[in-house]
Image (tube, helix red, strand yellow):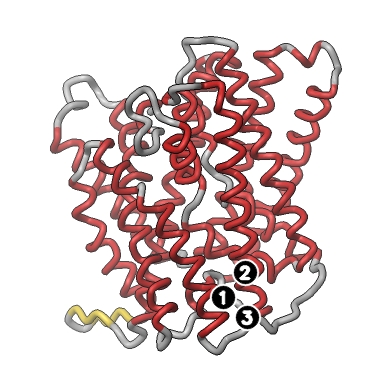
């Protein structure tokens, strides 16, 4: 799986500073962006402090991963770091965590696509004999058919270049939302709550999900021509990501207040050109990224097959078709995008982006023996991540049960 956890342009050595910044931004910016106004509405204005804190913590843990790699030149991936620190069992556990995270994100992409299509065509329905499928569920099936051709591509390098559109899509969406507020007659007049403690677990989980990308960080580092610039690359990438997240959250909340939907694009008036640009752009993200999310999961499954079957193209396609069918079933039964992404953020992203980098760094650097500020900082992040993970997961599961 190590080779699959790569961004565009990291396939070969010698990425420049700008290419590395692009790869870093592309690894983190994604579909979670559209949930930020909803997250802010759940927790209130003061929760922006936590969004900023999360960006600082995840920036620091990305640097810790780089230090872990510097401790052993043979390390080339996140899985290598886990194995070097805690053995082969840790590698398998981390592989399961990463695969599950990618699978759930793939389910979320189907939900995102179907919600956006339903926004554009609310009267659409599918009739199969006496069976009538209406609403969002009908578009879940349509989305699966749209995505189906991308599952025929098994070459990771092709998929990664397609996914590179993600950064531009996100920036277009943010610009379109601002234009709707400024020129579309919506305005920025909502006041909102200062703080809602009850909504903090869900909000923080959604904030964390927007900084999910640490599994790819080692590949970006390895691909760089000048590895001494890695800290600057991470800084500029996280600066752009944080600004984009802040602008999206604040703009969307000022536009619609507590009435903001789980995806800000669902609030936008389809009569406005800029709104339609945002909605049509959000439609491209699932199509561009679904196969990229599922391919590492498929490769992990293929890795457990007997040697005689690993290179059969028919087996590869069968596995990918089975994953698409299972994702479609889950999206059909649980069409709650914001809750699913909150679970991913609180349970999986917390593990990969908060807890594991600190634990691996403490083990590989042996700084836990000295009791210095690095030890205190890492232990503090682990404690914060554990608390947020437990509360966020519990809150998200309760919401999922209530919605279902």
Residue 124 marker? none
Evaluate if marks 3 and 1 touch, with contact meaning CB atoms under 8 Å apart.
yes
Classify residue 8 by image quadrant.
top left
The residue mark sitting in front, 3 or 1, is 3
What residue is drawn where x is 58% and y is 41%?
Answer: 236
Could you say whether the residue bearing mark 3 is in a helix, strand or loop? helix
* C-alpha distance separating marks 1 and 2: 6 Å
Which residue is at a point 55% across and 44% down the rendered structure image? Answer: 212
What x and y, as percent, mark residue 109?
40, 58
Sort mark 3 into few (<14), some (14-19) or many (20+) by Cα contacts within 10 Å. Answer: many
Q: Identify the residue shown where x is 36% and y is 58%.
A: 286
Identified at 54% across, 20% down, the residue is 81
Residue 224 horizontal/vertical position (percent) = 45, 25
Q: Is residue 152 left or right of residue 173?
A: left
Instruction: Check disc 1 and report the residue beneath it.
Output: 261
Tell me where residue 328 appears, x and y as whole percent: 34, 59
Closer to the camera in the image, 313 or 270: 270
Q: Earlier in the sequence, mark 3 or mark 1?
A: 3
Q: Nearer the viewer, mark 2 or mark 3?
A: 3
First in sequence: mark 2 or mark 3? 2
Secondary structure under the numbered disc 2 in the rendered image:
helix
Residues at badges 1 and 2 in contact (C-beta under 8 Å)? yes
Q: Is residue 47 above or below residue 15?
A: below
Residue at image mark 3: 256
Vertical placement of 83 versus 389: above or below?
Answer: above
Residue that mark 2 sits on:
38
Residue 152 shows in the view: yes
């Amino acid at each position: 799986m190590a080779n699959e956890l790569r961004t565009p342009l990291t396939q070969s050595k010698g990425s420049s500073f700008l290419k590395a910044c692009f790869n870093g931004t592309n690894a983190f910016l994604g579909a979670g962006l559209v949930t930020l106004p909803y997250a802010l509405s759940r927790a209130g204005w003061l929760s922006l402090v936590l969004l900023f804190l999360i960006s600082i913590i995840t920036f620091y843990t990305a640097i810790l991963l780089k230090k872990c790699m510097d401790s052993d030149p043979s390390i080339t991936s996140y899985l290598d770091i886990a194995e070097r620190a805690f053995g082969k069992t840790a590698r398998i556990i981390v592989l399961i965590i990463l695969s599950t995270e990618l699978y759930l994100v793939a389910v979320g992409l189907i939900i995102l696509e179907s919600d956006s299509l339903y926004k554009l065509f609310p009267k659409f329905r599918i009739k199969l004999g006496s069976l009538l499928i209406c609403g969002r569920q009908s578009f879940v099936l349509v989305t699966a058919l749209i995505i189906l051709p991308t599952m025929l591509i098994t070459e990771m390098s092709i998929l990664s270049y397609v996914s590179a559109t993600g950064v531009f899509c996100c920036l277009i969406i943010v610009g379109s939302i601002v234009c709707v507020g400024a020129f579309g007659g919506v305005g920025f007049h909502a006041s909102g709550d200062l703080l809602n403690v009850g909504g903090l677990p869900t909000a923080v989980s959604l904030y964390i999900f927007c900084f999910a990308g640490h599994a790819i960080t080692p590949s970006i580092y390895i691909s760089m021509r000048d590895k001494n610039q890695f800290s600057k690359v991470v800084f500029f990438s996280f600066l752009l990501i944080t600004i984009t997240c802040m602008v999206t959250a604040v703009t969307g909340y000022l536009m619609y207040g507590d009435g903001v939907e789980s995806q800000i694009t669902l609030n936008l008036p389809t009569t406005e050109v800029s709104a339609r640009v945002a909605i049509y752009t959000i439609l491209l993200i699932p199509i561009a990224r679904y196969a990229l999310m599922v391919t590492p999961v498929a490769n992990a499954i293929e890795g457990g097959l007997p040697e005689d079957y690993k290179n059969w193209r028919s087996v590869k396609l069968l596995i990918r078709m089975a994953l698409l069918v299972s994702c479609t079933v889950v999206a059909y039964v649980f069409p709650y995008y914001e809750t699913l992404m909150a679970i991913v953020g609180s349970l999986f992203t917390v593990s990969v982006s908060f807890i594991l980098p600190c634990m691996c760094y403490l083990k590989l650097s042996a700084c836990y023996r000295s009791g210095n500020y690095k030890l205190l900082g890492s232990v503090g992040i682990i404690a914060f991540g554990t608390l947020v993970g437990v509360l966020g997961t519990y809150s998200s599961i309760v919401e999922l049960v209530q919605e279902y």
